[in-house]
Structures are given as C-alpha cells and as structure tokens.
Amino acid sequence: MLLASAVVVWEWLNEHGRWRPYSPAVSHHIEAVARAGPRAGGSVVLGQADSRLAPYIIDLQSMHQFRQDTGTIRPVRRSYYDPSSAPGKGVVWEWENDSGTWTPYDMDVGITIQRAYEKQHPWVDLSAIGFCYVIDFATMGQINRQTQRKRRVRRRLDMVYPLVSGTLPKSQSWPASPGAAAAPPVPACTCPQCLLVMSVKAAAGPGASTLQPRKAAPAKPPPAPKPAVPAAGPKPPDGVAAVRGSLKPLAAQGGRRQAASTPALSSAGASGSPPGGAGGGKGSRASLGTLNRSHLQRLAIAQSRVLIASGVPTVPVKNLTGSSPVNPALAGITGILMSAAGLPVCLTRPPKLVLHPPPVSKSEIQSIPGISHSCRKTTKKQAKKGKTPEEVLKKYLQKVRHPPDEDCTICMERLSAPSGYKGPQPAVKPDLVGKLVKCSHVFHLHCLVAMYNNGNKDGSLQCPTCKTIYGVKTGTQPPGKMEYHIIPHALPGHADCKTIRIIYNIPPGVQGPEHPNPGKSFTARGFPRHCYLPDSEKGRKVLKLLLVAWDRRLIFAIGTSSTTGESDTVIWNEIHHKTEFGSNLTGHGYPDINYLDNVLAELAAQGITEESLAQEKD
C-alpha cells in the first residue's frame, strides 16, 4: 500500500500495445463505479459518460473493456499520476491526425510535453521516451526526426482527473481498497441496460453483483419453475423485480445445470479477485467463470430468443467459443444484456477477418497491361549530388540581403541575427540568409546546410515549413523485392474489376551509412507483406506511382515500430497500403472509397506525381 495523493487515470490498451487514456469525464465515471464496490454491479457502461462510447462496457472484475458491436475485448488499467502533472491540472496535449481531428497523446507523453512547456523550453525531444518526434512550442508543431514531416499540436484545458488521497493500492484491482475513503452510496441506475443486467444476475443465481453456481435440479422437475431469490443482499428496485419476472423460464432453464467444477474467471488485468460479499459465507463469492460453457450458451440462446421476439436488433458478439483469455461469460452475457442504444442485444456470429484472397494458381495470375515485368528489386540509385552541400543548395536558393523581421523556423533565432544552430559548424557564415525559389520561405543558410547534412544527402531538399520538395527526393529503404500481378478476385467495393496484388519482401540485414545506426543489424518483421489495389484505371495509376516510390526507396524505412515499439526494424514510411483483402476490420482493408485519392496525396507529399512517370520509365 502507498500513502500518497494522486490523480487516477483509467486507460485501455490499443492494438499497437500503447495505453490510451480515457477522457477525464469518463475516468470520473469509471472511478465512481469502482469506488462504489460490488454493490454497483461491477460493470461500467461508458455511454452514460460519453455518448460516443455507447458500445463499450468495462467489466471491473476482469479489468477488460468489451465492445458490443464487434465483440472486441481489450485490457484496461487504473493508473496513478502526480497531482502536479498534466492530468492533475486538466491539461491535455493533442496532435492533428490525417483526417483533421485531434488525438490526445499517451499520458506519459503528454506529461513530458507539459513539463517542458512549464519550464519554458523552446522545444522538447521525445526520443528519450521512445518516440522520434520533436515538439516545437514556438510553432506548436510536431516534427518527425526521420521524415521531417510536421503536424500541428495543441494544448487545451479539460476537467481535472479524479483525485484520491490516503492509502492507495499498488495494483489496479477492484473493488477499491478498503483503506481508501468510503464513497457515498450510489443509487441504483434505472436505465434499461442496468435494469436488465441486475435482473438476469438475480435470476441466474444468488448474489446481487455476480452469478453463482446453482445446485443441481431434482430428478423430477417441479410443476412450476420459479425464479431464484438472492440469499442475501439488498432488495433490487421494483423495476428490476418487474423485469426479472419476465425471465422466469430463462432462470429455470439455467438452474438445471451444475457448474461448480468450472474454474473461476481469469483476471488478466487485475491482481486478485474481489472479496466475498455479505451473503458469501466463509468462502469467496463465485464469479461469472463458475458457469460452464454449455450453461452460458444455453442462457445466451434462451435470452436471444426472448429479445428477438421483442424486436431487438442483433449485433455480433465474439469470444463465446472460449478462444479469448477472458472467460466467454464476459463476452456472452455482457453482449446479450446491453447495446449502444440502451437496449439488449442478440447473439449473432461476428464478422471474420479476411487478410488473404482464396488460393490462386499460377495459371490464373496475369501480368498488368502497360507495366513491363512483374518484379522489381531495390536499387540504391540516388539523384546526382553536387560536390558540396553548399553547391546543392545554391540551385534552390536566392540570397537575401535584407532579412525580414521574423524567426528562422529551423533555429528559432531572428533572421537578422546569426544562426542559433549549435551542432557541427558548416562552412557557411552564420549570418547569411537565403530564400527558397519556389515557396519563398526564408532561412539561415547555416541552418539549411546543417539540415541537409543531417538528412539523406541525396541532392534534394524539402522546405521544413511547407514541405515543398526541391530536386528528386529519395529515401533509405533497405534492399528487397517488389512483386505485382493481377489475381481473379474482386475487392469489397470494387466488384466490377479484378485485384492487383503487391508482395513486398525485405530480408533482415545490416544498416548502411544512410540509416539511423550504421553497422548495426536491423530486423524485418511480417515479410512478405501482401497489399491490394483494385485493377481499375486509378488503381493502375497508383501502382505505377508506387513503383516510382519503390525505385526511390520511399516505401519503407528503418526506425522504431509504432506497433511493437521495436527499434532498428523495417517500418512503413508514410505511404499507406491496404493489407486486408476481404474485410475492413483493422482499417487496412476495403471498402474504402477515399483510399486511392488519399494514397495519391501521400505520394505527392513525397514528390511523386504523374510528372514523375515521365522522369522514370519502366
């Protein structure tokens, strides 16, 4: 136990292995239910705090979040932070994503940014906490150290996260520590979701907060089945009793099976099981895991029939087969009882992830008209270099004799003053100023030469302000192979054409002088990688431009994976690909009506347009 004051932030684990914070309002809601203990039911309906989170429910016993419309289950945790840090002051740092909306940083990143901001640092480098970004407070921008891509960031004020003091539990378990201050009694919720939850829990077994195993039914069934009555605990509200009465057949059917031998629910996110309640006797109270799979499925089917008859819409529910580490009861019972609209849901089969097309024989594979060959290897060809960086930049710059009264956005010093760059000194006077000929942005020549020397040094230059590219931009993609052909299957949303399949294959190797850590080995996870385009006019155009990007070594790079956090590995390089063939459950599949236009825009941001096709022919 820890004696301290702290703010509580509830977080969930995303598919990239990063803990993402719930908003302050949602964290307050979760914390209130957690502090109320077993009498609150142990389930948190997030839609009651934020209507956008209506499909989500948290089961506090297993510390997992369940999404009802897809059946996805994710771990959650209860984290403690210093009250003087960003969450304790209601400060939220966010970055602008590709769709123009704002995404909050992970809590540890936001705290790091806020700490530097309060110390009035001009910028903060996030590489110390595993991210290759620099936050520039003067321009309120996030700069990718590898690609120099810039995004806007913002700082806004929100609610302060819930504050706790006194005795704090080390683990993120539920119910809340008995040493903590007792929360005031929470009145029972009377929304349709909670009424149905409480009624089925009461009908399925003794206890107000968890389902318990029931004794085996006698050999001769009673003439009239009656619903189970809790042995102890508070009496449910009248509304609950009314609903429970309508579930008499279901409760009677569920009581005919014995489940005492089934192991308890495993808690992947919690350190222990909640203690028994007043009616639990000496032994600990049984959890949902005490019901075996057959019992749960019969309960689910019977409940589904009642709900279908009443016209309740169906949504898919996963994990009833027990393949998840979370007991199927969590997915099954929760999915049956609640829905995003505040109504119960019915049990249906979930959509399936379809990564690859049906098997294709060699005779069915076709070459792509208008594109020679069906395979291309990485070349290390780069644009012709000048003798020195100064000579390269001279082609793109005009000297400025009277600098404007503004800052150089590279060193953040006034243009009328010498450059503030403190690294290795280029052979250029620090007070010279130049203007880029296309975009007319003005910088210290000293800063531009330093930026060029820190980049790929391929004879090209990209304006750090507007990203205009001068020359032919190339990347640092390691050697590999790109295959492409047509297969006789259609993508969802493109039923009128066949499919272009691209196969990338890059082996592991040793980093070269252009990579982050020359001489050090790098890994290549997930290869070969299969990607898909519709075999339409626009799809073939995208393929041709992707071939140019491949030749310029811009498809992949070596860096830190945002999915696994692994460093010195092959990663995607800002050009999105569709890797899911027959579904779009991950967001990397079809249908996606905007994908082709979006990827054309991403290619243009790398300097690859239709004009590039004339420069580099097959």
Image (tube, rainbow, N blue to C red):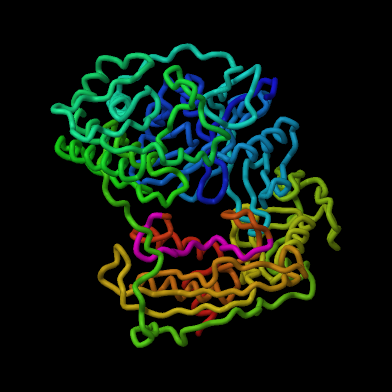
Q: Does the stretch in magenta take in 327?
A: no
Q: Quadrant of residue 306?
A: top left
Q: Quadrant of residue 5?
A: top right
Asked whether residue 28 appears in the rendered view, the answer is: no
Q: Position of residue 407 (x, y in %)?
A: 71, 44
Residue farthest to the top? 184
What number of labels is visible? Answer: 0
Residue in front for this viewpoint, 88 or 536? 88
Lateral position of residue 332 relative to residue 22, left or right: left
- The magenta stretch is 568-585
Vertical comparison of 262 with 461: above or below: above
Residue at 39% in and 85% down: 367
Lateral position of residue 262 relative to residue 190, left or right: right
Residue farthest to the front? 219
Residue in front for this viewpoint, 421 or 323? 323
Residue at 25% in and 18% down: 239
